[in-house]
Image (cartoon, grey):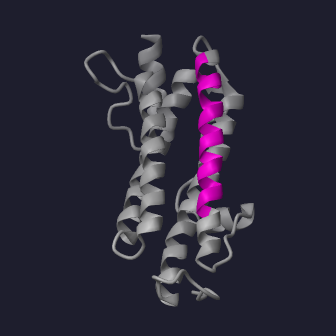
Amino acid sequence: MVLPKYTVPSLTLQEGADVAAVLQTRLDALNDLALTLKHIHWNVVGPHFIAVHEMLDPQVDAVRLMVDAIAERIATLGVAPVGTPGELVKNRTWEDYSIGRDSAIAHLGALDVVYVGVIEDHRKAAKDVEEIDDVTNDLLVGHLHELELFHWFVRAHLESAGGVLTTGNAQSEKTAARKASAKDTA
């Protein structure tokens, strides 16, 4: 781990480096999420096309703003943020988004799984920095507010009136997409 050249006054160099390392994982995840959202935006088809297509652009824009805020926080901590595609792919712990051209409901089923993963990891990151850096914790908690809102928008398309998800407890994007599509055509 590279220690920062400097850090904010309330953090030691090691704390700044530790917080920056946590933030780098979120930078990678959110860059990936923005690209995934745009991929879905381009590849969604079917009767719900326009609703989903138009719902995703504001999410892409908001996630890109989150990426910028995280990169700037990393830089503020004295560490160089890394936003290159090669490093993102090398460092990620998840598989690439697996759905190509498909129905809006199939993509939303898969996106539900994506959002669950991003939100869970974001919560863990917020918890990991909670005792070290209030500013970073606040930044991540603010992002969680928006990410959870976007997740709700996705799930609203997948829930019955009784709150049952058409995707059930699917753990993979493909399984979630298949389950959501099956309910949509039933």
The count of marks equals: 0
Q: Residue at x 38, y 70 (%)?
A: 128
- At a point 36% along the width and 68% down the height, the residue shown is 130
In depth, the one of 172 and 131 nearer the eye is 131
Instruction: Give residue 89's quadrant in the image.
Output: bottom right
* Closest to the observer, 70 or 120: 70
| Quadrant (top left/top right/bottom left/bottom right) for the C terminus | top left
Q: Main secondary structure of the magenta part?
A: helix
Residue 88 showing in the rendered view: yes
Instruction: Evaluate whether residue 117 shows in this view.
Output: no
- Rendered position, 32 above or below 83: above
| Rendered position, 58 above or below 145 | above
Vertical comparison of 180 with 146: above or below: above
Residue 181 vs residue 111, the one in the foreground: 111
Residue 90, percent from left and from top: 65, 68
- Please give left or right for residue 32 compared with residue 18 in the image: right
* In the rendered image, the vertical position of residue 4 relative to residue 73, given as above or below: below
Q: Position of residue 59 (x, y in %)?
A: 59, 37
- Magenta residues, start to end: 51-70
The verdict on residue 57 being magenta is yes
Residue at image location 25% in from the left, 18% down from the top: 162
For the N terminus, give its image quadrant. bottom right
